[in-house]
Amino acid sequence: MTCGMMRRMGKHRKRRNKQNQNEKRHVHASPPQVVTPAPFNPSRSVLREAWFWSLVFFLISLGFPIVFPNADSAPQAYFGWTLWGLTLALFLLGFWLQIVGKRWAKSALAFLAVIVFLWAAHRNIGQRLRPSFVFVAPGAVLNGDSWDFVTNHRGPKSSSNVQILFIDEDRKNYLTRTKTSLTQADINSEQVLWALPEVNPMGRGNIFAQQLIWKPFNLSLSHFTAEITWRDGSVHEELQIARVQDKWQYAMRVNDRESGKRLIWCRDRDFPSNETLPPCFPDVVKESD
């Protein structure tokens, strides 16, 4: 090998070593950079739309009870709360986009708001859909031969323009068996029409309970019916009273006349019947809750 070739190889080796050193120096001098994503920054138009529509649905929700003041049916109650749900969803969207904070904190607040909303909706819908109705309850025996009947009420709403057709079924059956035609006096002895302007929950609006004094055809074992109507509904009531071991025992059935729904079905323990029902007394004589 000639001296010229050896010199060229030495120069080539030096250049390669120098290049390797520069590459190592460059690697140590420039560590890899971590690229962090830019925080999400919603545009002003998105925020404006979220707050605008939340305000629109808020005003619609406020106006719904004004347009439908008696919105106590199931579809109307659920629809009204759906409007409030949309209002809450849009409000939470605006809150999420507007407020700068940790994701877990905003998630916790949104979750709490949804839980409170669902609890309030469940409570309100259940209260609004509870049936409100009037029925006749036995009060006390007067003068040893007459019942003092009182009107009672269940449900959250007052019942206006109440009419009660109260019938003594025992006397009615007796007259039907023994007479071919009935006089007005016979009819008055078996039934009475009882009109009341209003029956209110908890007995408000009257100092004394609305009372009906009635002398039954058979005091020791009586059967009465009542057709009860008011402005918003009507019920059919069956009431039986028996004296068992010097105690009064009741059996009562109250059905909604339109839907047939059972509103009150009860029988005292010692009432002469084979039906298994919850006891009537003292719940049927308590004031409405």
Image (cartoon, rainbow, N blue to C red):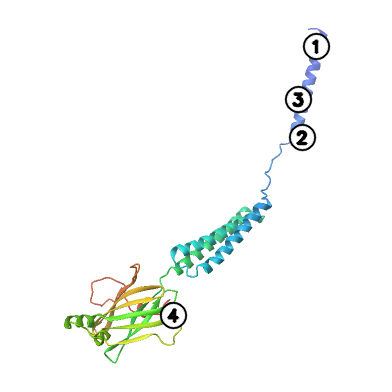
Q: Is residue 74 left or right of residue 284?
A: right
* Element on which disc 4 rests: helix
Label 3 sits on what residue type?
A: Asn
Q: Earlier in the sequence, mark 4 or mark 3?
A: 3
Local crowd size for mark 1, using a 10 Å CA cut-off: few (<14), some (14–19), many (≥20):
few
Residue 6 numbered mark, or none: 1
Q: Position of residue 269 (x, y in %)?
A: 27, 76
> How far apart are labels 1 and 4 at the CA level?
118 Å
Q: Earlier in the sequence, mark 4 or mark 2?
A: 2
Q: Are marks 3 and 2 in contact (CB under 8 Å)?
A: no
Can residue 95 be seen?
no
User: 76 or 211: which is nearer to us?
Assistant: 76
Where is 181 relative to 259, above or below? below
Quadrant of the snapshot with the C terminus: bottom left
> How far apart are labels 3 and 2 at the CA level?
14 Å
Mark in front: 2 vs 1: 2
Label 1 sits on what residue type?
A: Met
